[in-house]
């Protein structure tokens, strides 16, 4: 494949470069001649970060966990690599907001990515948003920060990217003017690995089973979220904030093949859908090149190959986390932040073998029921809700 050329030279900070989205972003970046990597960041995986630095030669590398930092700095020097190593979480904000950066890919998982994502929005960067938890927690605060500082926020999540592709193009990215003839949007959901698993087996589902997604290959947290369908619940909230929609303008439909990534229903009866193989290089390339397009090596769709496309209603009794997400989107305020924090703790406990799969939804529901929701008028209020939900979730997990 010939290298792509962007309309203008650009410099990218990649937050979460060692993760699944991070690696897919580097796969796209490798095929673009005029995209330079300004910074790569990792939480603990120093070995992978080193290999990435040797290949992409960024100005900065950030390792959040100080434990491996000395060894990484030595290894960079020994290899003759000029990349400067920064250590600790504050460095994430610095490389997200640096004046030399044009685009920031927010691909850290969970609330840990929030501060740097906001820093990129406030610094007016093109913000490629994969870190859905940051938007779920802060909603209008992140959207307003982007809007008021000239940051073009583009959705990487495949469903939201699909919706964005089905809307008329306007110069600022997402704008209310795109929705004048939109009746509703429909998010597709694969349904994850347990779509048809008998409910009485949910309690014995192991982390390995939950992480084996039938269609997508992803990090462990989002894989568990897909298995509980909390991922679709978070995406429901994400869609409401991103596109400025009320909860009753958003629907979810199960589509196990993940070929149609989402749809927009217009007032004349037209329905526009975006299709592609389930490969995150497609939305990543779309957002990096937008409003142009570039070439990717993603497998091409072959609709005549015999695969049929199925659709069905989601079963909210089976996937309570989806229903909780829809409810949080209706309630708003700190409800999405409470749900997100509870879920992060529950998923971590499940992955560590401290909580059964079926209890994830129960912990999330208990937090929503027990902690009163407030207006999410400041970051302090949101962080406070986040800590209270985590503390109570851990009490519930330890007692279960
Ligand atoms: P992952 O677990 O594979 O990677 C997470 C990245 O975040 C790693 O680079 C890790 O080092 C970094 N990280 C983790 N904890 C951190 C911390 N405390 N501080 C700083 N960095 C930290 O996850 P992923 O699958 O790449 O997902 C990343 C984000 O993208 C998530 O919000 C997920 O919901 C979203 N997303 C992922 C996919 C996908 O296909 N993987 C699709 C849509 C959206
Ligand atoms: Mg998605």
Image (cartoon, helix red, strand yellow):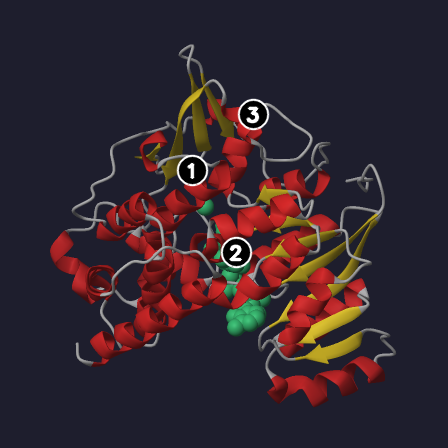
Above/below status of 278 relative to 368: above
* Relative image position of residue 4 (x, y in whole percent): 80, 40
Q: Residue 131 carries which label?
A: 2
Q: Is residue 192 toward the left or the right of residue 62 in the image?
A: left
Q: Which mark is residue 258?
A: 1
Front: mark 2 or 3: 3
Label 1 secondary element? loop
Residue 55 appears in the rendering: yes
In which quadrant of the rendered view does residue 291 lie?
top right
Query: How dense is the environment of label 3, judged by Cα within 10 Å: few (below 14), some, or many (20 and up)?
Result: few
Indicate which disc, 1 or 3, sits on the residue closer to the N terminus: 3
Q: Marks 1 and 2, how far apart in space? A: 20 Å
Closer to the camera in the image, 46 or 388: 388
Label 2 secondary element? loop
Indicate which disc, 2 or 3, sits on the residue closer to the N terminus: 2
Residue 218 appears in the rendering: no
Query: How dense is the environment of label 2, judged by Cα within 10 Å: few (below 14), some, or many (20 and up)?
Result: many
Residue occupying image coordinates x 56% and y 45%? 156
Q: Can you say which quadrant of the picture contains the N terminus?
A: top right
Report the residue marked by disc 3.
Answer: 177
In which quadrant of the rendered view does residue 248 lie?
top left
In which quadrant of the rendered view does residue 336 lie?
bottom left
Residue occupying image coordinates x 50% and y 57%? 134
Closer to the camera in the image, 150 or 191: 150
Q: Marks 2 and 3, how far apart in space? A: 25 Å
Task: Indicate if the residue with disc 2 has its beta carbon within 8 Å of ligand 1.
Answer: yes
Indicate which disc, 1 or 2, sits on the residue closer to the N terminus: 2
Q: Marks 1 and 3, how far apart in space? A: 29 Å
Residue occupying image coordinates x 34% and y 76%? 352
Task: Indicate if the residue with disc 1 has its beta carbon within 8 Å of ligand 2.
Answer: no
Residues at circles 2 and 3 in contact by the CB criterion of under 8 Å: no
């Amino acid at each position: 494949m010939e290298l792509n050329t962007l309309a203008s030279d650009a410099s990218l900070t990649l937050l979460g470069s060692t993760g699944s989205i991070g690696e897919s972003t580097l796969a796209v970046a490798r095929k673009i001649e005029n995209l330079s990597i300004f910074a790569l960041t990792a939480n603990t995986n120093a070995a992978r970060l080193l290999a990435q630095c040797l290949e992409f030669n960024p100005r900065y590398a950030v390792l959040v966990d100080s434990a491996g930092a000395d060894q990484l700095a030595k290894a960079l020097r020994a290899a003759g690599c000029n990349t400067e190593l920064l250590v600790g979480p504050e460095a994430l904000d610095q490389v997200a907001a640096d004046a030399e950066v044009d685009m920031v890919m927010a691909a850290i998982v969970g609330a840990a990515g929030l501060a740097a994502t906001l820093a990129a929005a406030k610094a007016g960067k093109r913000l490629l948003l994969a870190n859905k938890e940051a938007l779920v927690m802060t909603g209008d605060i992140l959207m307003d920060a982007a809007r008021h500082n000239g940051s073009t926020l583009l959705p990487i999540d495949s469903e939201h990217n699909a919706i964005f592709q089905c809307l008329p193009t306007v110069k600022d990215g997402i704008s209310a003017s795109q929705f004048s003839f939109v009746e509703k949007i429909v998010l597709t959901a694969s349904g994850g690995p347990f779509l048809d698993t008998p409910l009485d087996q949910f309690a014995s589902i192991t982390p390995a089973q939950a992480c084996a997604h039938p269609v997508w290959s992803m990090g462990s947290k989002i894989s568990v979220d897909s298995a509980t369908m909390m991922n679709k619940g978070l995406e429901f909230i994400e869609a409401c904030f991103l596109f400025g929609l009320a909860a009753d303008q958003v629907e979810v439909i199960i589509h196990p093949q993940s070929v149609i990534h989402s749809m927009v229903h217009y007032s004349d009866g037209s329905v526009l859908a975006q299709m592609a193989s389930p490969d995150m290089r497609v939305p990543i390339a779309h957002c990096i090149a937008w409003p142009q397009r570039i070439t990717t090596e993603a497998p091409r769709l072959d609709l005549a190959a015999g695969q049929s496309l199925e659709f069905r209603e989601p079963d909210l009794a089976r996937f309570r986390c989806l229903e909780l997400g829809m409810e949080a989107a209706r309630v708003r305020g700190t409800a999405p932040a409470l749900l997100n924090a509870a879920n992060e703790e529950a998923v971590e406990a499940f992955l560590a073998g401290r909580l059964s799969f079926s209890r994830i939804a129960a912990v999330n529901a208990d937090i929503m029921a027990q902690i009163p929701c407030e207006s999410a008028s400041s970051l302090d209020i949101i962080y406070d809700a986040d800590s209270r939900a985590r503390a109570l979730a851990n009490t519930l997990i330890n007692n279960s």
